[in-house]
Structures are given as C-alpha cells and as structure tokens.
Amino acid sequence: MLVELGIITTVLALVLAWYAVLAGLYGAQTRRDRWVLSARNAALLTWPLLTVASLALIISQINGDFQIEYVWSTTERAADLFFKITALWGGQAGSLLFWSWLMSTFAAGALILNWRSERRLMPYVIVFSMATLGFFLILNVLVESPFARFWQTANGEVVTAVFQPVGTFPAIPQDGRGLNPLLRHPGMVIHPPTLYLGYVGMVIPWAFAMAALASGELSTSWIRATRRWTLVAWLFLSLGLILGGRWAYDVLGWGGYWGWDPVENAALLPWLTGTAFLHSVMIQEKKGMLKVWNMALVIISFILVILGTFSTRSGIVSSVHSFAQSPIGPPMFVFLALASVVSIGLWLYRWQRGELASEHHLEGWLSRESLFILNNMVFMAITVAVFWGSYAPIFTELFIGEKITLGPPYFNSVTAPLFGALFILMGLAPLSAWGHTSLSRMGRAMLWPFLAAVGLVAILLIFGMRDVGALLAFGLAGFAGFVTLYEIWRGVKARAQREAWAVAAWKLFGRNRRRYGGYLIHLGVVVIGIGVIGSTIFQQETQRTLAEGQSLTLGRYTMIYDRLERAQATDGRVMTIANVEVYDGSQLVAVLRPRQDFFPNAQDMNTMTIAGSYSTIENDFYVLLVAWEEISQASATFKVYLNPLVNLVWWGGLLLMLGTAVAAWPDQDRQRQRVTRRIEAGEHGSPART
C-alpha cells in the first residue's frame, strides 16, 4: 500500500509540475491572472504530494520492505533507525526523490514569501522552477524510480519493475544490503542534504533571473528577491563543503580534509560564482552597474549546479563521493544543454536590446566598486582553474584520445596565488568608498591594519618560522583579518560614545546586519585560511610498525602502542581497535583508539578506517591504524600526522555560518520595505495586467 501511495503521489506531482509550467506560461502570455493563480496552486500542491511520497519511502525503509529495490540496497535489519531514515538520500533513486522534494519546498517558499512583493515576476518564476522540478520528477517516474520492486518469474529469474509483470510473483529478500560503510558517519549523513539544499537553493535565483529576462522586468526587483535566496543557498553550500571536509578528515583515512576530488570541486564551483555574485550585486544596487555581469553570474551558477548534479550521477567523473554510472546521464545532459541554451539566449536577447545597460561608470580604480570587480575577476579565475582541473580528463580524452588527470599539485600551485589576491582585496575593499577613493586616503585607512600584519609576520619570524611562502600567506590573511576587526572596532567606537560597548556592538550589528554579517563572514574566511595554511604547509607525517610497548615520536608528541583488541558492533561490523597513549613531553595527554571497521555484508567498500586524534588549538595529533599482525596481534602499523591549526578550519566554518545568518536575517525596517514594494508592484491589482 505504501509503495502504491508513493507511486501515485509522485506521478501526480509530475503532472501538476508540468501543468504549472503550461498554465503559468499561458497566463503570462495572455495576461490572464486566473491561469497564473491556477499555476501557483498546482506548484504549491507538489510539496504535500512529494512529502507523502518521501514519507512512504522512509516508512518502507524503517519497516524493512526489502521487496523495494531501493530499500534493499540502502538498508538492513541491523541498521540503526537513524541510518534507516537518512538512507533516503543514500542512493541514486532516493536522492533524486529527495532533490525533488527540496525543489518543491524551495519553490513553495519563493511563491509564498515573494508572491505579493514580486508579482510581476511570479508567472515566469513558476514556469522555470516547475520546469526544473518537472524534469527531476521525470527521472523519478520514468528512469530511476525509488519504488521499483523485485519480481520473480516462474523459472526463478528475478526482475525489477515498478508494476508487477505478467506471470511473476513478489520476490522478497530476507535482508537488505545496507548503506555503503563510508556513508555511515554523522558528517556524511548531514553533508549530502546540506549540499542538496545549496544546489536546489541556487535554482530559485536562476528562476527569478529568467523571469526578469522573459518578462522584461529588469529593474532592481529581481535583484532584491534573488540576493536573499542566493545567500540562503550559499549558506548551505558553505555548510556542505565544511561538513564534507570533516567527513573526509574523519573517515577517508588520509590525514586531510580537501583532496581536490572532482565531486568536491563540483560543489565548490557554484560556491565560487555565488560568492562573486553576492559581492557584485551590491554594485548594481548602489550604482546600477554590472547588470549584464550579475545576470551572467546567476546563469553560470545554475549551470554549474546542474553540471555538478550531472557529474555525480552520470559516471563521467570517478570519485568516492559519486554514484555509479546510471541511465540518467543522457537525459540530464539534454536538460543541461536546453537550460543553458534558453538561459544564454534570453540573456543575449536583452543585452542586445540594451536593456541591461549600466546606469553609471567607474569613477576611480580605488573605488569600492572597482575593487569588487577585481574581486569578481579573481573568483572567476579560480572557477576556471578548478573547472579545468576537474574536467580535464574528459576534454583531453575527447579531443586527443588520452585521459590527462590533474592532481592536487596543479590545484595548489594555480589557486594559491589567486586566494592570496583575494585576501588582499578583502583587506582593501572595506577601506574604500563608493565612487572614488584617493590613494592618500586609502593609505591612511590601511595604515594600522598593515602595521598589525607586519607585526604578525615579525612575531612569526622571532618564533622561528622561515618559510617565505608561509610568512607571506599568514601576512596576507592577517591583513584581511585586521582590516575587518578594525572596521568593526571603528563602528562600535562611534556608537560607544553614548552607550556601553556591549550595547553599542549589539545595536551596530542589529542596525546593519548585511554589512556586519559580511564582516563576520570575512573573519570566518580568514580563520579558515589560517587553518588551511598551517595544516597544508606545516603538516608532518610518519609511518611505523610498533610492537606492544614500543613508541614513535612526531613533533613534541610521543605515542606508545599498548594493545590491539577486537569487538563486534550491534550492526554486524567487526572492529579492530588499537589502544595507544599520547604524551606531550612526559605528560600523558590522551588515550586514543584508532580502528578499522569491517562490514562483512557490504557489497561495495567494506572497510572503513576511523582515526584517533588529540586536538588542541595548536594542532591535531592524528593516528591511523593501517595494518596489524593477524596471529599474535603483538604488532601494528600506524600512520601518524601532526596537523597544525587544522581545527581553525572547522571553527572558521562556524563563524562563517554565523555571519551568513546575520547577513540574511531581515532588517528591522523590513516590514516597511515590504509594504512599499507591494504598493510599487500594484498589490491590489492583477499581476498580469499591472
């Protein structure tokens, strides 16, 4: 019964999504408001339908209905309830259903929250958002159904089909295969949905941009709606990238958190272009400039989102993160091509007509808008470099017949100077003014932050750091951080003349959340940057085989191997655990238990390496159990890393999340602004006739 309910609701959602596309398009073209309202109602109905479908699949997973192929492939009887529920996005078909549900959720949110303020754009927002949802539902219904079941023929052959073929009867396995062991980690459970939220969230700004291009409503209206939705999507992309790094650090067993994996890069690309848009959109709001460029950035971000989704599901890139090759590759490529052609075509059409012309021009190369443009150029340079490094094997095999893979050395060498340039611009931009800034004024404004950065480099030299690249990197990151702190201090100081410092700081952030939330984001990026610099340049590693009681030393830490033990978990995995003691000098600071988990029933990768780590502000002492002597278990081989400042990567991520939440939070005068926009949009009239 649950299966039939899931099938029916998914098909109904598919029909309603495409009805909303046609009704919205017809209503927009004929200016008939009742068709637009009908399209809106149909679009909103997709959410409860897909909610029911998703719940039907989740309940089937909890109940262990192993006749459903997806349930069999992602769950097992011994799995914890938590993993049975989150298996919804643990495989191809379920993740597509989850993607569709998120898309309907975002679309419903956009229609409800922006219906009155942006009614002129709404018909085409419905068209483009529902066309995207409709495509993914086609995949769910016709290509990768999560409700396909096992059926057995009279001769014992097992087939998979949504509906029962003639002459077959249900085939019900006794148990499921279970999740890939690598996915049985809290970070990986949370990482995919946050990335999906970021991916799907980027569809909404694209829908507003396309609505503006299709309708000709190219005022700042679409920018107002798009910026906040982009910020929300950017927040989830950021969180997904941080969680993905943490998962890699904890589970993949190589001592790092970012290996320039193609699927990692696929998520990074729209983050880069989204970041560029969030900076350049301020120039359009303030000066009426960069209209062509901002529209292009939204389109590129959407294309990169679909490309990333296509890459992970088509098998064109090889990654521990990606799904196996499947039949959804060709239709996804067709959708990507059509969406790109339509988007670029509308953009070129309005550009050619002069409807995206700038209202002002640059007044000086040290103005804030000039520095933001340079910022965008650097972001796009990083995007191109990462794109080429990620997809080079495909292009080289296609054009020269040889697959050339570019690894971490390429990415590190190309992106490091570009990220250095970003830190310089992060420091200069807040000190500049809109319109024009003289060189002398800029010099005076940056004096104290610059001296603080020089002082930081001098301190590092005194404490023995001699790596020129590291000193330069810390100096640039420090400059950007000191400028941000200086700007916050100046704002608080101005208010503190009439109120307490704590009150002044609270009110300062409350009155200008966008600006000071942005400063917190900058601080988060600086902290992450310092963590990346320290853990990349100064990482130490060693590998040794130790008998019981023997030790190894790395940095100032000494590790003594105590014993090896075996244990079995309730989910059936067999754990081999090493007990080691970690000393800082003569003081015992930690007892670690690095282990390897073996999953005897797993069909894919059945071994997972879990590190043991001793963490401080200064570094991580990170231990991996690599191998052991099977018979006596008297010796074991360990790989040990010392990762300086690595925890700043996670703490900086938290600060970045906080800053994004502050920047996205509605201002105190938002209600007044919304009323004004409603009046401008002609709230009491027909949107199609206004």
Image: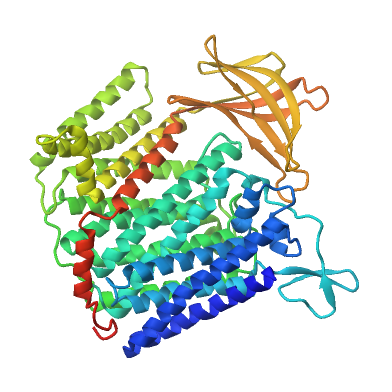
**Picture layout, residue 339 above or below residue 509:** below
Q: Residue furthest top?
A: 586
Q: Is residue 324 left or right of residue 360?
A: right
Q: Quadrant of residue 325?
A: bottom right
User: Which quarter of the rendered picture does the N terminus lie within?
Assistant: bottom right
Q: Quadrant of residue 501?
A: top left
Determine the residue positioned at 55% across, 44% down.
Answer: 187
* Count of numbered tags: 0
Determine the residue positioned at 28% across, 50% down.
Answer: 375
Q: Residue furthest right?
A: 155
Q: Is residue 1 left or right of residue 275?
A: right
Residue 86: x %, y % from top left: 60, 53
Of 413 and 73, the residue lying toward us: 73
Residue 383: x %, y % from top left: 40, 54
Examine the rendering and report whether any part of residue 293 can be seen: no
User: Which quarter of the rendered picture does the C terminus lie within?
Assistant: bottom left
Examine the rendering and report whether any part of residue 360 can be seen: yes
Residue 85: x %, y % from top left: 62, 54
Determine the residue positioned at 29% across, 25% down.
Answer: 457
Residue 480: x %, y % from top left: 27, 38
Q: Say how the picture is coloured.
A: rainbow
**Picture layout, residue 112 above or below residue 406:** below
**Picture layout, residue 524 above or below residue 165:** above
